[in-house]
């Protein structure tokens, strides 16, 4: 294997090193304090009662029975809920949803909060909620894509994707000598982080303190301030540890607002922690999709058209449409492209961003359709992709900021051993007689940047404190960001104290979209650079310094010393420079964002390719993924250990998507019948056998000053289609729905024989 993990030193020696997570010991020993671990004095426990129908009204709650429980303190229902200062149907931030906070007695989905019970103990509150014994006037629930007519919508930013169209789509269809017209379906999936959503809320006058997991601390403070009519600076949000998020913890949720309201009503701290079952309701999910793909190619196997239309489930009361068709926009070059979206209103909680939103669902269908077209053309699937991958962004012609996709194909295929794969299905068996199939998929994910701020303080002893309100959901962001900060200051990592996870710190933006390390890291890099600039000015003006007069030459920071650029023997320790200047600390500030002109000039993505081997029992139709090899080009890798872990995690999620994850609704009540880890299946250790990640070296000078892209989501894309294509190659049966089940193969009469 080529040594692809080692990155060239750019401004220091910390980045590029496989540093162990800074928070690892605290988490595995139980010392880490998550939101629900907080137990302030006078704490009340809150439990909300979830609706057990999906559509209708609550006609009765037995409040008297619940109030009679000796441990119940208060019950809040739509009949007596105090008003909020902000409208719960409004969207106070760019990434807001309408929330359920007992506005009325209407039930819009199963699991919606219909009452809140406060108790002296969790057990009392739980029993009080049970005693409410709700009765309903139920209406017929709509929970499947065929239950309502799809509607078109005007794109409106977050939640309503724009789609795209360029070239002569009708002409592209007419010009095709080989074509496929196929429909793929993906099931609804639900965020199931190890840590469920929780909050501990406490008021002191008009100041609110929140302990809660958050992927967007500053934005969340603004949202909660809106609902309670206080300035954003009056909200303190502490989020030192998160047990996973996947997109679901970047937004305000109704249960958390209700807990905050209860704390204000009672004058006591209130804790609310969702049960596992309650995660299947008001905190977002990946909506189900039905995607029609019509692809055409000419006699040279060059794409003439990509026509991708997606229908996605959304809620009856808000708008978030899984942008699945957008997965077709940037990956393959075709004479014409159309990516379009419609939606279906169902009686479900509002969907939302879930790891690789759009790209995960869309690439699953696209990669299978590409394989089907390669089959029609009689060409190897890898060769077909090599002929058609885009070298400039389709539709805009913007050049990609780097071109590493070909290396991803080459390195993953070589490691996997793809050469010599038989073109026809059902040609390979192992020594035990199991059918063996090989499939592949291409991975693509945008490389966004948001906006962030950071602060760096160089202390008189030459050590440093760096601060930003970054969130670490478990991916190791705090470790990688500390490495960037240490390099920006020219200090060893153990000389840098890193503070994050608190809203009083500089705003680190949103931890999402695979853009957090790039955004917050650029801000930290700038803050460290600001400190070194100030230090250089002091040293250059100090006649007692060996650096006196060297300002025009410039300085670099190395191992706690300031050195003249190009003459690093001429240097002085940070502490000595500061001591002669009076011993005061230096404070630097920095921001991170992308210049609009860069985004207008360049198309910026991370790329990858995933190859899968699947074995299928010819009698029982049981499927097992036995090998996954993924190669990814994701810019400068700050921490190879953490990056590899994230990419592996994405590929495992792709396995889960392909073979396991599916929320199933009871057609009578509309409830999700598998709302737990017993029935909602995800990939576990036994499902993961051979798994290998290759990071392809990539220097991208345009994506940002550090050349960083994201690795959190791209591993999902490509993997789903690779597994499905491998199942076809093993069995000769094409299953066009996810997850692929044993039943699907049995009903198709495959692969028996």
Image (cartoon, rainbow, N blue to C red):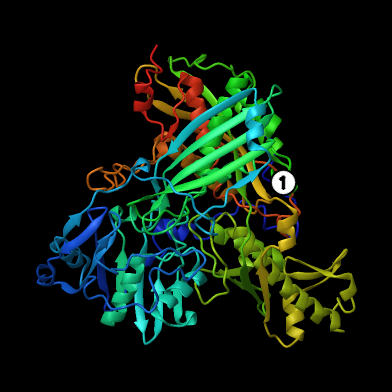
Question: Along the line of sight, which residue is nearer the eye, 204 or 596?
Answer: 596
Q: Tag 1's secondary structure?
A: loop
Mark 1 surroundings: few (<14), some (14-19) or many (≥20) residues within 10 A: many
Question: Which quadrant is the C terminus positioned in?
Answer: top left
Which residue is located at x 45 percent, y 23 percent? 615
Indicate the quadrant where residue 80 lies. bottom left
Give coordinates of residue 729: x percent, y percent.
51, 21
Question: Which quadrant is the N terminus positioned in?
Answer: top right
Side (left or right) of 599 relative to 39: right
Task: Specify the farthest residue to the top.
Answer: 753
Which residue is located at x 46 percent, y 18 percent? 435
Question: Along the line of sight, which residue is nearer the eye, 725 or 330?
Answer: 330
| Total numbered badges shown on the rendered structure | 1
* Residue 95 appearing in the image: yes
Q: Which residue was labeled with disc 1? A: 698
Give coordinates of residue 154: x percent, y percent.
52, 55
Which residue is located at x 52 percent, y 66 percent? 94
Which residue is located at x 75 percent, y 55 percent? 601
Give coordinates of residue 91: x percent, y percent.
45, 68
Indicate the quadrant where residue 73 lies. bottom left
Side (left or right) of 295 relative to 403: left
Side (left or right) of 632 relative to 621: right
From what the image shows, is residue 570 above or below residue 738?
Answer: below
Give coordinates of residue 640: x percent, y percent.
62, 48
Indicate the quadrant where residue 76 lies. bottom left
Question: Along the line of sight, which residue is nearer the eye, 28 or 575?
Answer: 28
* Residue 410 appearing in the image: no
């Amino acid at each position: 294997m080529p040594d692809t993990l080692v990155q060239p030193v750019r401004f220091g020696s910390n980045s590029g090193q496989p540093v162990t997570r800074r928070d690892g010991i605290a988490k595995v020993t139980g010392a880490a304090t998550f939101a629900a671990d907080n137990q302030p004095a006078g704490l009340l426990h809150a439990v909300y009662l979830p609706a057990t129908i999906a559509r209708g009204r609550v006609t009765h709650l037995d409040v008297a029975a619940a109030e009679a429980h000796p441990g119940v303190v208060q019950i809040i229902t739509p009949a007596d809920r105090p008003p909020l200062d902000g409208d719960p149907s409004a969207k106070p931030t760019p990434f807001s949803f309408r929330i359920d906070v007992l506005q009325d007695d209407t039930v819009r989905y199963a699991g919606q909060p219909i009452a809140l019970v406060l108790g002296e103990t969790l057990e009392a509150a739980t029993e009080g909620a049970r005693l409410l014994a709700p009765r309903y006037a139920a209406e017929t629930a709509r929970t499947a894509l065929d239950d309502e007519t799809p509607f078109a919508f005007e794109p409106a930013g977050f939640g309503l994707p724009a789609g795209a169209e360029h070239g002569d789509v009708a002409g592209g269809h007419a010009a095709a000598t080989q074509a496929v017209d196929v429909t793929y379906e993906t099931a609804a999936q639900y965020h199931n982080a190890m840590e469920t959503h929780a909050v501990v809320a406490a008021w002191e006058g008009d100041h609110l303190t929140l302990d809660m997991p958050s992927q967007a601390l500053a934005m969340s403070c603004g949202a909660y301030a809106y609902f309670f009519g206080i300035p954003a600076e009056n909200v303190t949000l502490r989020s030192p540890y998160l047990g996973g998020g996947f997109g679901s913890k970047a937004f305000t949720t109704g249960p958390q607002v209700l807990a905050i309201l209860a704390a204000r009503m009672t004058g006591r701290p209130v804790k609310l922690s969702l049960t596992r079952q309650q995660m299947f309701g008001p905190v977002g999910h990946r909506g189900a999709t039905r995607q029609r793909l019509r692809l055409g190619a000419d006699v040279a196997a060059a794409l003439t058209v990509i026509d991708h239309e997606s229908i996605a489930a959304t809620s009856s009361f808000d708008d978030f449409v899984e942008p699945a068709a957008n997965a077709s926009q940037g990956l393959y070059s075709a004479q014409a492209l159309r990516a379009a979206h419609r939606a279906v209103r169902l009686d479900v909680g509002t969907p939302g961003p879930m790891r690789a939103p759009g790209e995960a669902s869309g690439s699953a269908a696209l990669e299978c359709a590409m394989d089907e077209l390669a089959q029609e053309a009689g060409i190897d699937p890898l060769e077909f992709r090599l002929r058609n991958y885009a070298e400039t962004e389709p539709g805009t012609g913007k050049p990609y900021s780097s071109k590493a996709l070909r290396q991803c194909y080459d390195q993953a295929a070589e490691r996997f051993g793809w050469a010599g794969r038989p073109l026809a299905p059902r040609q390979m068996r192992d020594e035990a007689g199991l059918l063996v199939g090989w499939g592949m998929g291409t991975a693509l994910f945008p490389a966004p940047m948001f906006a962030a701020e950071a602060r760096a303080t160089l202390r008189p002893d030459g050590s440093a404190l760096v601060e930003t309100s970054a969130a670490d959901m478990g991916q190791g962001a705090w470790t990688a960001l500390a490495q960037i900060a240490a390099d920006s200051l020219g200090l060893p990592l153990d000389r840098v104290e890193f503070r994050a996870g608190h809203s009083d710190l500089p705003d680190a933006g949103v931890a999402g979209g695979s853009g957090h390390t790039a955004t917050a890291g650029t801000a930290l890099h700038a803050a460290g650079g600001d400190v070194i600039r100030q230090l250089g000015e002091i040293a250059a003006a100090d006649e007692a310094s060996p650096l006196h007069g060297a300002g025009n030459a410039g300085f670099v920071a190395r191992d706690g010393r300031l050195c003249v650029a190009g003459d690093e023997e001429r240097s002085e320790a940070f502490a000595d420079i500061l001591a002669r200047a009076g011993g005061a600390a230096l404070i630097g500030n920095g921001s991170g964002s992308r210049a609009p002109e860069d985004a207008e000039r360049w198309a910026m993505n991370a790329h990858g390719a995933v190859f899968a081997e699947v074995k299928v029992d010819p009698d029982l139709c049981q499927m097992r993924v036995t090998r996954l090899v993924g190669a990814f080009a994701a810019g400068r890798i700050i921490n190879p250990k953490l990056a590899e872990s994230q990419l592996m995690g994405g590929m495992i999620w792709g396995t889960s998507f392909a073979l396991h994850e599916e929320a199933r609704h009871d057609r009578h009540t509309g409830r999700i019948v598998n709302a737990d880890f017993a029935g909602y299946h995800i990939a576990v250790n036994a499902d993961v056998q051979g798994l290998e990640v290759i990071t392809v070296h990539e220097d991208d000078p345009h994506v940002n000053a550090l050349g960083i892209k994201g690795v959190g989501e791209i591993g999902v894309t490509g993997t789903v289609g690779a597994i499905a294509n491998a199942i076809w190659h093993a069995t000769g049966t094409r299953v066009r729905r996810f997850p692929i089940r044993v039943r699907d193969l049995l009903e198709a009469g495959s692969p028996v024989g």
